[in-house]
């Protein structure tokens, strides 16, 4: 097309159209009008009026597509690509489709955009697309995108979590449930390897369903993957359907059942006491067998159920009631357990506030243990607990108190071969509940409490009375058994001053009496008593301990004064002895005695003079040493003297020297008696004093003097 204009600027334009695809191929101004157009060498030539020759060369298809994409002509670009498909790789096509998707997204055409994004999923970088469609108004498109990823088996647990979350937000519950049920699992209820792209965070999704009150969906997931604990929890706490929970529990293997039952038995006892008690009896007596689940799920109930359950006081009554309506053929036959029944103790705590059901359960266990000769320790635990439960009900159920006490006595009479430890426990229980008849029955086989020979019995008795808040009784126990178990005094002081409530109940007068007893028996030192009384939570009045403190402080003062006097006397004596020894060793001895130290007659020569001051006639010395050991033997018995072999010790001083040697020998022997040291300190009430007394008697001596008869 040539446009002639009178303006100085050329307005001639060359325009080439693609009539097939309806778009402008070339559009450009030229210097003058077109004279001729011809094709040669696969190019198009245009001859213009000014003599110029223009050559037009067609770009290749990829360059054409690039131009179209830059001009946002994506439909045309994709159309040309389809016509020339072999010229493009899959990635090149998907990149253009992705750009087209962004173009559509920016124009708010989300449906068409997601179609383009779905087509280019193999390119990767799916998180970018997912983040674009997370808005609440675009979740429906996000679901389509993730489902395609699942179809391509490239989804991750995070993608599936997002998919299921999106279903919940849009309340697409049928689609949610269908997706879960379509997941294939193996025998262990794990997703099979070929379905791992459908994995998701089970706990998080279950919690999501519960948060949105989609409890049935949460139950579908829990049942799909055999999460027994979660199934039962949802049925009980969320759906309020204890019947279905028990129905499901009865379908579990014994190991899985135990894990679930222990966690939920308290709640089940509140909602379905009889049915739960029967299940517990079956499980813990070895009668449990797996039952198939009923097809219909129970209706929702709550803890304030309108069901009325009769109260049973024995296992026989309960068993008869539970079997009512069954034909003779339907009554359960006695079978030997096919598994090792678990220890009943593991569910004892679950029967809190369900004493009657607890009685039924324990009686059934006792019957089973008798029949199958169960573990003796477990049986002992059951009997002790049942005995205590009978006495508890005797106190709470006043109308049937006598019946419960008769049951307790029958339990004691039923078996007489309990160990001494079992007897002590039962005596303790009888004492706590003030059941004197039971205590008498047990004591018939025991002459006195000491015959039980159970260490710490008195302490257990005291603690039990404290736990029962019976302060009066605990005080009587201290007075009765304190002389045998000294630790009771310490425990009593600590307990009575541990709280203001205990302190007010025991009173100042009794506490003073307790301190006087401790002082008389000398079983605790003053520091130990003060340590027991100085509690941050209780303020013991000074008047209570004033006299006790004054007496003990006065005793301490007198003892300190006495020790000071002894110390001074010993120091004075030691100083005199050292002075005398120095005089004997260094200074000459002046002899001014005129009489013999043996016969007391005037001294005459020959005579013997000793440094000790004694002077003896020779004939008196011979007479005094005659009949004794030889000279050599005598010389081995002195400590001080000459080194001459013929020296005879002073017959007057030799006795004191022998006593000194014997004392030294005893000290050396005493230092080797570590067992005596330990027993002395352990038995003493004043361990510090006993330790230093032991040291003073040579308990830590390590050196040893050897006397060879001539030297020290």
Image (cartoon, grey):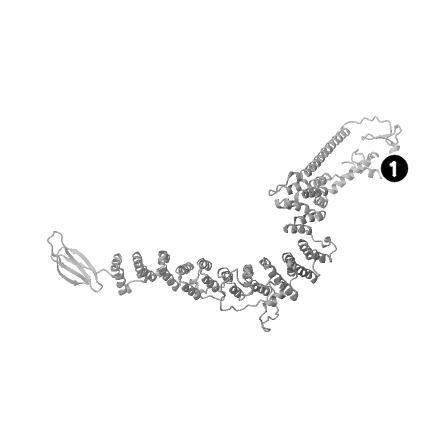
Q: Residue furthest front?
A: 399
Mark 1 element type:
loop
The mark tally for this picture is 1
Residue 81 position by quadrant: bottom left
Residue 39 location in percent, x, y? 16, 63
Name the residue nearer the viewer: 292 or 302.
302
Q: Residue furthest left?
A: 6
| In-image side of 461 versus 93 (left or right) | right
Look at the picture and state if 571 lies above or below 83. above
Name the residue nearer the viewer: 271 or 266.
271
Q: Residue furthest bottom?
A: 329
Residue 182 position by quadrant: bottom left
**Quadrant placement of the C terminus:** top right
How many neighbours does mark 1 have within 10 angstroms: few (below 14), some (14-19), or many (20 or more)? few
Residue 493 position by quadrant: top right
Residue 385 appears in view: no
Look at the picture and state if 634 lies above or below 395. above
| Residue wearing tag 1 | 626
Name the residue nearer the viewer: 462 or 269.
269
Residue 147 location in percent, x, y? 38, 63
Residue 327 location in percent, x, y? 58, 73
| In-image side of 371 versus 81 (left or right) | right
Look at the picture and state if 564 lies above or below 172. above
**Quadrant placement of the N terminus:** bottom left
Residue 199 location in percent, x, y? 44, 61
| In-image side of 265 versus 209 (left or right) | right
Residue 174 appears in view: yes
């Amino acid at each position: 097309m040539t446009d002639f204009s009178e303006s100085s600027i050329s307005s001639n334009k060359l325009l080439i159209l693609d009539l097939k695809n309806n778009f402008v191929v070339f559009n450009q101004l030229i210097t003058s009008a077109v004279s001729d157009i011809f094709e040669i060498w696969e190019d198009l030539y245009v001859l213009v009026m000014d003599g110029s020759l223009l050559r037009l060369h067609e770009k290749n298809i990829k360059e054409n597509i690039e131009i179209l994409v830059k001009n946002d002509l994506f439909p045309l670009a994709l159309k040309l690509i389809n016509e020339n498909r072999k010229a493009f790789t899959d990635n090149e096509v998907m990149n253009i489709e992705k750009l087209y998707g962004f173009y559509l997204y920016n124009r708010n055409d989300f449906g068409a955009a997601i179609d383009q994004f779905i087509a280019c999923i193999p390119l990767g970088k799916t998180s970018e697309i997912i983040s674009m469609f997370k808005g609440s108004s675009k979740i429906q498109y996000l679901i389509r995108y993730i489902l395609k990823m699942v179809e391509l088996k490239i989804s991750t647990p995070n993608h599936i979590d997002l998919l299921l979350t999106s279903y919940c937000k849009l309340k697409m519950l049928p689609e949610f449930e269908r997706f879960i049920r379509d997941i294939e699992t193996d025998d262990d209820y794990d997703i099979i390897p070929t379905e791992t792209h459908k994995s998701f965070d089970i706990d998080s999704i279950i919690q999501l369903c519960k948060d949105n009150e989609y409890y049935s969906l949460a139950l579908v997931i829990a049942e799909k993957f055999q999460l027994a604990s979660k199934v039962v929890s949802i049925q009980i706490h969320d759906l309020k359907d204890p019947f279905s929970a028990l129905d499901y529990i009865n379908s579990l293997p014994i190991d899985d059942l135990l894990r679930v039952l222990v966690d939920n038995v308290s709640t089940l006892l509140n909602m379905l006491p009889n049915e739960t008690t029967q299940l517990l009896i079956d499980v813990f007596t070895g009668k449990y067998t797996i039952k198939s689940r009923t097809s219909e799920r129970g209706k929702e109930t709550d803890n304030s159920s309108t069901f009325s359950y009769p109260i049973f006081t024995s296992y026989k009554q309960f068993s008869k009631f539970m079997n009512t309506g069954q034909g003779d053929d339907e009554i359960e036959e006695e079978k030997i357990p096919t598994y090792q029944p678990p220890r009943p103790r593991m569910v004892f705590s679950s029967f809190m506030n369900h004493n009657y059901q607890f009685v039924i359960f324990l009686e059934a266990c006792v019957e089973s243990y008798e029949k199958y000769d169960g573990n003796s320790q477990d049986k002992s635990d059951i009997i002790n607990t049942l005995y205590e439960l009978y006495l508890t009900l005797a106190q709470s159920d006043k109308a049937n108190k006598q019946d419960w006490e008769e049951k307790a006595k029958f339990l004691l009479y039923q078996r007489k071969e309990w160990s001494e430890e079992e007897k002590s426990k039962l005596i303790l229980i009888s004492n706590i509940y003030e059941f004197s008849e039971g205590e008498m029955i047990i004591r018939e086989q025991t002459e006195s409490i000491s015959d039980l020979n159970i260490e710490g019995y008195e302490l257990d008795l005291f603690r039990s009375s404290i736990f029962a808040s019976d302060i009066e009784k605990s005080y009587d126990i201290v007075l009765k058994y304190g002389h045998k178990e000294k630790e009771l005094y310490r425990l009593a002081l600590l307990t009575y001053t541990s709280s203001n409530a205990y302190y007010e109940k025991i009173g100042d007068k009794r506490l003073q009496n307790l301190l006087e007893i401790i002082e008389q028996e000398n079983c605790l030192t003053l520091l130990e008593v003060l340590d027991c009384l100085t509690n941050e939570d209780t303020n013991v009045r000074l008047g209570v301990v004033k006299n006790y403190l004054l007496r003990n402080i006065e005793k301490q003062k007198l003892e300190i004064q006495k020790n000071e006097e002894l110390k001074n006397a010993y120091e004075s004596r030691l100083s005199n002895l050292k002075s005398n020894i120095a005089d004997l060793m260094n200074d000459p001895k002046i002899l001014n005695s005129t009489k013999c130290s043996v016969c007391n007659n005037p001294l005459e020569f020959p005579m013997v003079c000793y440094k000790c001051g004694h002077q003896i006639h020779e004939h008196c010395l011979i007479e005094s040493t005659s009949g004794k050991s030889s000279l050599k033997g005598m010389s081995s018995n002195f400590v001080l003297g000459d080194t001459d072999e013929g020296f005879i010790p002073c017959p007057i001083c030799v006795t004191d020297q022998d006593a000194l040697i014997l004392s030294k020998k005893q000290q050396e022997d005493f230092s080797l008696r570590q067992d005596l040291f330990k027993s002395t300190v352990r038995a003493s009430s004043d361990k510090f004093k006993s330790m230093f007394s032991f040291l003073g008697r040579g308990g830590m001596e390590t050196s040893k003097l050897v006397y060879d008869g001539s030297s020290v």
